């Protein structure tokens, strides 16, 4: 067991000629956390910056952050990181992550923030659940469910959508099954099932 920061420990092992794979059990025991991961990506960053300038988009992004921070305060994530127009959060349960996502989308929808004259400010959200490696540095979490949640939130979802991995939905205990529809996507030759949550 090690109390070193994840990447410091990996660097130390490599410097000592030790393959970190040989210490995988120890690494997971020291740095693994079972969490629900929440990934938010705003819509239209590149397009809006090109047409209206970066200052315009940043002002909208800051408005979004101020609106949704009280939601995160209410649901108490164990980790929260802001990175550009993304928000990454880790929650103790899939239900907390899903409920926070619903409230974030409702808050943005009712806020009246406009990306431009004709388009409301919108966000896409992906949610995963599983045991992930946590780095105490700015990188945050690593693992399959982190990758899937990021793919769903940043690449697959459209504005206003909440997409949930199959594993995250399986661990949700207080959600209405009638509000989700199952979908499928192909990633690197693999078929991945996930769920789309209707957000009123």
Image (spheres, grey):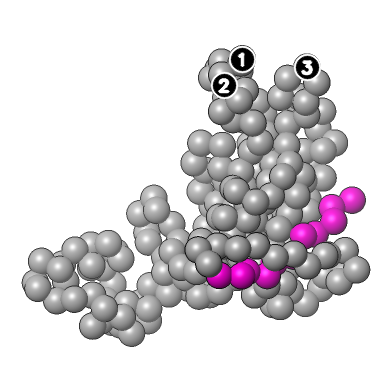
Mark 3 crowdedness (10 Å alpha carbons): few <14, some 14-19, many ≥20: few
Q: Is residue 176 left or right of residue 126?
A: right
Q: Earlier in the sequence, mark 3 or mark 1?
A: 1
Residue 11 coordinates in the image, percent (x, y): 19, 63
Dots 1, 2 in contact, CB < 8 A: yes
Number of the label disc, if any, that sits on residue 117: 3
Image coordinates for residue 199, horizontal then vertical, percent = 84, 52
Indicate whether residue 194 is drawn in magenta.
yes
Q: Residues within 10 Å of mark 2 (few under 14, many from 20)?
A: some
**Residue at numbered disc 2:** 49
Which of the pair 56/164 is nearer the observer? 164
Q: Tag 1, which secondary structure?
A: helix
Res. 186 image quadrant: bottom right
What residue is shown at x 35% (from left), y 54% (from top)? 137
Against 110, residue 182 (above or below) is below
- The verdict on residue 166 being magenta is no
Tag 3's secondary structure?
A: loop
Q: Earlier in the sequence, mark 2 or mark 3?
A: 2
Q: Residue at x 78, y 67 (%)?
A: 182
Q: Position of residue 171 (x, y in %)?
A: 69, 77
Q: Marks 1 and 2, how far apart in space?
A: 5 Å
Q: What distance separates the C-alpha of mark 3 from that of mark 1?
A: 11 Å
Quarter of the image with the N terminus in it: bottom left
Residue 65, horizontal then vertical, whole percent: 63, 36
Residue at image coords 81%, 32%: 111
| Cβ–Cβ under 8 Å for marks 2 and 3 | no
Q: Which residue is mark 1?
A: 52
Inter-mark Cα distance, 2 to 3: 14 Å
The secondary structure making up most of the magenta span is strand
- At x 73%, y 37%, the residue is 122
Q: Which residues are magenta?
A: 190-200
Residue 108 is at least partly visible in this image: yes
């Amino acid at each position: 067991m090690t109390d070193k920061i994840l990447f410091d420990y990996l660097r130390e092992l490599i410097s000592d000629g030790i393959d970190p794979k040989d210490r995988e059990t120890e690494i997971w025991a020291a740095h693994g956390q079972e969490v629900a991961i929440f990934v938010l990506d705003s819509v239209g960053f590149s397009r809006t910056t090109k047409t209206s300038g970066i200052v315009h988009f940043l002002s909208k992004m800051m408005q979004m952050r101020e609106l949704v921070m009280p939601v995160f305060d209410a649901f108490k994530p164990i980790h929260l990181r802001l990175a550009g127009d993304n928000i990454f959060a880790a929650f103790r349960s899939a239900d907390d992550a899903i409920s926070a996502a619903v409230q974030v989308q409702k808050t943005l929808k009712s806020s009246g923030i406009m990306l431009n004259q004709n388009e409301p400010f919108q966000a896409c959200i992906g949610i995963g659940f599983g045991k992930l490696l946590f780095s105490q540095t700015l990188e945050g979490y690593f693992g399959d469910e982190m990758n899937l949640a990021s793919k769903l939130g940043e690449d697959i979802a459209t504005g206003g959508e909440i997409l949930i991995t199959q594993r995250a939905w399986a661990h949700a205990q207080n959600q209405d099954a009638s509000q989700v529809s199952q979908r499928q996507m192909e990633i690197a030759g693999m078929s991945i099932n996930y769920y789309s949550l209707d957000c009123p």
